[in-house]
Amino acid sequence: MRIAVIKGDGVGPEIMGATLSLLERYIEADFIEIKAGKSYFIEEGKPIEDNAIEKIRGCDSLLKGPVATPTKGPSYPSVNTLLRREFKLYANVRPFKSYEGISIRRIDTILVRENLECLYYGWEVEDEDRAIAMRVITKRGAERISEFAFNLAKREGRRRVTAIHKRNVLKRTDGLFLDAFYRVASKFDLSADDEIVDAAGYKLVKLDNAFDVMVAPNLYGDILSDVAAGVVGSIGLCGSAQIGEDFAAFEPIHGTGEDIAGKGIANPIGMIIAASMMLDWLWERGRSPKRGEKIREAIDSVIMDRILTPDLGGDFRTEQVVEKIVDRLRD
């Protein structure tokens, strides 16, 4: 296998280095580093290296650390958005699972977030008095992400798919999304329902196992995934996949964590879970042995034994957590 790697900014190089130290002992692969992000921009004056897209296309998948897009001072177009659009990564898959003694509720939910449309499409205009953002929801995009969510639910043995919306206010855009969802739902022998986005956030926090599979437009999915991560107990415990028709990228759902960068205490588990999801995706395509589930079982064992970084109340360092996971894999 050839796996493209973007280390990222902030804690990115630390958690990526820890994850690669595990993968190098567990699978046979060539890791191809791609320079990108804020640190690369400061050094070279550009957010991503020349010919990066071609180099990534020559690989089987992309493993990516968190990349910063500056909001103050000199800035540049988002590397994350560039990669999503270049590789048409329309489905953002974020699983959330609770851990006893850490999570505030029992949760075992997969959130499927449409990844290319909604307000994140990036159409904005302004004058002296106003700034206007265009929200784009297409029939094709809504049907495609709904089909992805139902197929995922079927493959994972799930029973219910819930569409997240605000149709009571946004009657046209969310109306289109919800209508497309139910058209797709009629083709599957699975339960289908819908929930208003603010009520969904409340239920995630208030109720155990409130949802099974959720499918949402881009903005709602982004917000609810952080709510779900809070229910899990730390955003550092959560990984994600960005999936297109023939390529996929994998990353933790958290940001760059500039305040703890360089201290060696960042939680590597979200990054490692993302890597395990990558191995699942590669295995489904016949490119890798089936190894992802074993990594997640080792993670569960480590967390159960309270081998935790400071974000979870522990005192273990990044590398120590990874070595414990490697030990469980050896066992």
Image (spheres, rainbow, N blue to C red):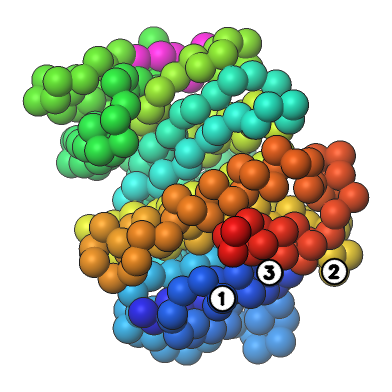
Residue 262 is tagged as 2
Residue at numbered disc 3 = 18
Crowding near the residue tagged with mark 1, few <14, some 14–19, many ≥20 C-alpha atoms within 10 Å? few
Q: Nearer the viewer, residue 194 or 156?
A: 156
Crowding near the residue tagged with mark 3, few <14, some 14–19, many ≥20 C-alpha atoms within 10 Å? many
Report the side of 106 relative to 50 (left or right). right
Marks 3,2: beta carbons within 8 A:
no
Marks 1,3: beta carbons within 8 A:
no
The residue stretch that appears in magenta:
194-201
Residues at marks 1 and 3, CA–CA distance in whole angstroms: 11 Å
**Disc 1 residue type (three-letter):** Arg
Q: Secondary structure at mark 2?
A: loop
Is tag 3's residue or tag 2's residue first in the polypeptide sequence? 3
Residue drawn at the location 72% of the way across and 81% of the way down = 42
Residue 25 is tagged as 1
Q: Nearer the viewer, residue 61 or 48?
A: 61
Quarter containing the N terminus: bottom left
Residues at marks 2 and 1, CA–CA distance in whole angstroms: 24 Å
Residue drawn at the location 68% of the way across and 69% of the way down = 18
Q: Secondary structure at mark 1?
A: loop
Q: Is residue 272 visible?
A: yes
